Amino acid sequence: MAAYSPRRLAEYLTLVARYAASASPSLPSPPEPLLTLTHHPSVLFAGNGWAAAGITRVLATILYSNYAADYTNETTNLANWAEDIVTAAFAEIRSDDLLPNIFGVSSGSTFSDGGASALLASVAYRLASLGYISSNGSLIETAEQIRAAVEDSIGSDGWLSPVSDPLTFTDEGSESPEAQAFVLLLEAAFADWKA
């Protein structure tokens, strides 16, 4: 399934750094294809969630600044990139309504990752709140499925499970502070979307 290639992302970030150091009036276009098909076992859903959540945070920062009108092309690009990540991730939803820890089930043993699922669902709610995706479209439908599954996966002790082990990432863990934070991001994004 589609995922950010670390090499392509690094190339783009180098371009962005050059842009920041110059007086160029617009952000450079990303190298094609920034979003690539890959089944490498190190392409984790949580990493893609971090990328999409970071992009969405930058997008919101620009939109709520005094400079939003000066960066309409850039905000559109940011929204499109975040939506691409979420769309690719949601295409791999499992029967338990969670996402696996690794892109491409054929790449090896994977498990459902409640933390990555929560983070990626939060991005869908944020994009809808910002007006970049439909509030009643398929991405929000899937985010709703994931949110319900995440809430059902919180044990009586308050810990979300299943999650990626916070020390090894590719192994299933029983407790993850990162995943707990992702649940808070999900619930905050959902509350803002509902408001």
Image: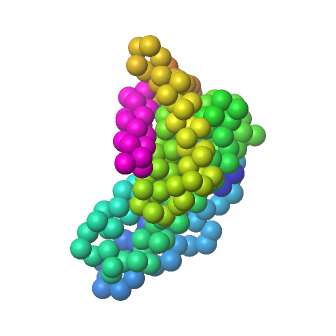
Q: Which residue is drawn at 44% across and 13% down?
A: 156
- The number of numbered discs placed on residues in the rendered structure image is 0
Position of 127 compared to 25: left or right?
A: right
Q: Where is residue 112 in the image (x, y as percent from the top left)?
A: 61, 31
Residue 43 in sight: no
Magenta region: 175-195
Q: Does the magenta stretch include residue 183?
A: yes
**Colouring chosen for the image of the structure:** rainbow
Observer-nearest of 137 and 171: 137
Q: Which residue is drawn at 56% across and 49% down?
A: 140
Q: Position of residue 34 (x, y in %)?
A: 58, 65
Q: Is residue 104 magenta?
A: no
Vertical position of residue 97 compared to residue 132: above or below: above
Q: Which residue is drawn at 46% across and 66% down?
A: 78
Q: Which residue is drawn at 49% across and 38% down?
A: 118
Quadrant in which residue 74 is drawn: bottom left
Q: Position of residue 157 (x, y in %)?
A: 41, 14
Quadrant in which residue 19 is drawn: bottom left
Q: How would you classify the magenta stretch by its main secondary structure?
A: helix
Vertical position of residue 44 compared to residue 1: above or below: above
Residue 191 in sight: yes
Q: Where is residue 125 in the image (x, y as percent from the top left)?
A: 47, 50
